[in-house]
Amino acid sequence: MTDKNKTATLHMDGKTVELPILSPTVGPDVLDVRKLYAEGGVFTYDPGYTSTASCDSTITFIDGDKGELLHRGYPIDQLAEKSHYLEVCYLLLYGELPTAVELEDFETRIIRHTMLHEQMQYFFRGFRRDAHPMAIMVGVVGAMSAFYHDSTDIQDPWQREVASIRLIAKMPTIAAWAFKYHTGQPFVYPRNDLDYASNFLRMCFAVPAEEYEVNPILSRAMDRIFTLHADHEQNASTSTVRLASSSGANPFACIAAGIACLWGPAHGGANQACLEMLKEIGTPDRIPEFIARAKDKNDPFRLMGFGHRVYKNFDPRATVMKQSADEVLDLLGIEDNPVLQVAKELEKQALEDPYFADKKLFPNVDFYSGIILEAMGFPTSMFTPIFALSRTVGWVSQWKEQLADPQHKIGRPRQLYLGSARRDYMDIENR
Ligand code: SDX
């Protein structure tokens, strides 16, 4: 990783600091500033971390200019086309594509952990029926540390593995039960004879009054949505999980922190906000009005589902998602979905507008996902829980990677202090 011949020399206040330059497998070099404060007496300053590498990782790589996303080196479009979510989970967790035997063993381990401790249902029942499913997920996942004591010791590799399997296996059940509780319908238990996506759809949409047949078109689309959201380098929620884990917090608390961060509309909450925006636009003739608002500096409105910190060409996940939206709606016989028509026309007009082209704002993963999810029967409030379910494997893989690094230490950023210099207390009568 370190290229002995590459360094950067910093001259300031009469000091000279030699900083190593580290070279990656692919992507930009990094300037190793770990000794900058000790030798130079200064901090780096990078709010939002636009130019900061917080860690080294071997899991996912994004090339924002090329619109490329690799998971352990495999391009996302190939994985979306040829693989399936649990195989991608194995790849992210263990670094290589599994053999048939390894995959069967992994899928069996996941299947055998999909049920929740029976007592947990009473935790759900403490929420109001109109609680947002994300509020329930944050609470229930955090509470898992109160139910699964035998997988909270992060120093024990076996417990780390069990916690990883439990989180990936139980997240669909938790998300589905949050949905069922929200709708007032009874919880549906997972089944071991169904694949991961089919199990989730059945837990969401089955009712005791009749048999539920999973539509293979929908389960394939669901599985692809899970795959497209699985991991994405050091995004805000993954960085939250890493920072929480750096203090030694248990895995369930760390993933609950990631869910909380993902909820924000600038991050995972964008899929719900995007569909609500498309519905507010309603018809293609209103698109110019919204594009004008998005460009207006005095208007906080932004085109939800557009733009990305890293992708400055296109989001490869959006490309796959757009194809899936066409396929799913066509196969479901919803050819003239007005929301999809608005989305396609909005994308066309925005990409023709210099503002978006100049700022390199393109549809991201959230732009089309909501259209598919709504066509599948989900309310917008379930969009981000589905994102959280999908991203759990990414959070867990990055969490495991950080814990396995003997160099890792507690994350503790510094600051540029602009407050008052030292001053003495003033008695109230003198103020
Ligand atoms: C996800 O990081 C990840 O990997 C995230 C994610 C993942 O898989 O984990 O990919 C998932 O979170 C996707 C992003 C979902 N969010 C949205 O769709 C919300 C709308 N998008 C924006 O909020 C914004 O684009 C962000 C938050 C996604 C990125 O913001 P940045 O990189 O901090 O960029 P910025 O806010 O500094 O914007 C740069 C310029 C600004 O204009 P100027 O101040 O330079 O004049 O572009 C403008 C912004 O005003 N801009 C937009 C815009 N996004 C940015 N203007 C209108 N509409 C938008 N959507």
Image (cartoon, grey):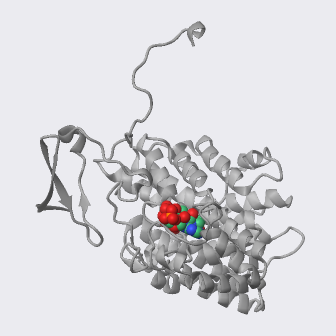
- Location of the N terminus (image quadrant): bottom left
Choose between 123 and 212: the one closer to the eye.
123
Residue found 43% across the figure and 41% down from its top? 248
- In this rendering, position of residue 178 left or right of residue 164: right
The spot of residue 263 in percent (x, y) is 62, 56
The spot of residue 133 in percent (x, y) is 72, 56
> Residue 338 appears in which quarter of the rendering?
bottom right
Q: Is residue 193 visible?
A: no
Farthest residue to the left: give it.
Answer: 5
- In this rendering, position of residue 241 left or right of residue 205: left
The spot of residue 39 in percent (x, y) is 17, 40
- In this rendering, position of residue 230 left or right of residue 407: right
Choose between 2 and 430: the one closer to the eye.
430
Residue found 62% across the figure and 75% down from its top? 367
Q: How many marks overall?
A: 0
Residue found 44% across the figure and 75% down from its top? 312
Choose between 374 and 348: the one closer to the eye.
348
Choose between 52 and 72: the one closer to the eye.
52
The spot of residue 95 in percent (x, y) is 37, 69
Farthest residue to the right: give it.
Answer: 209
Q: Is residue 269 visible?
A: yes
- Location of the C terminus (image quadrant): top right
> Residue 331 appears in which quarter of the rendering?
bottom right
Residue found 56% across the figure and 48% down from its top? 257
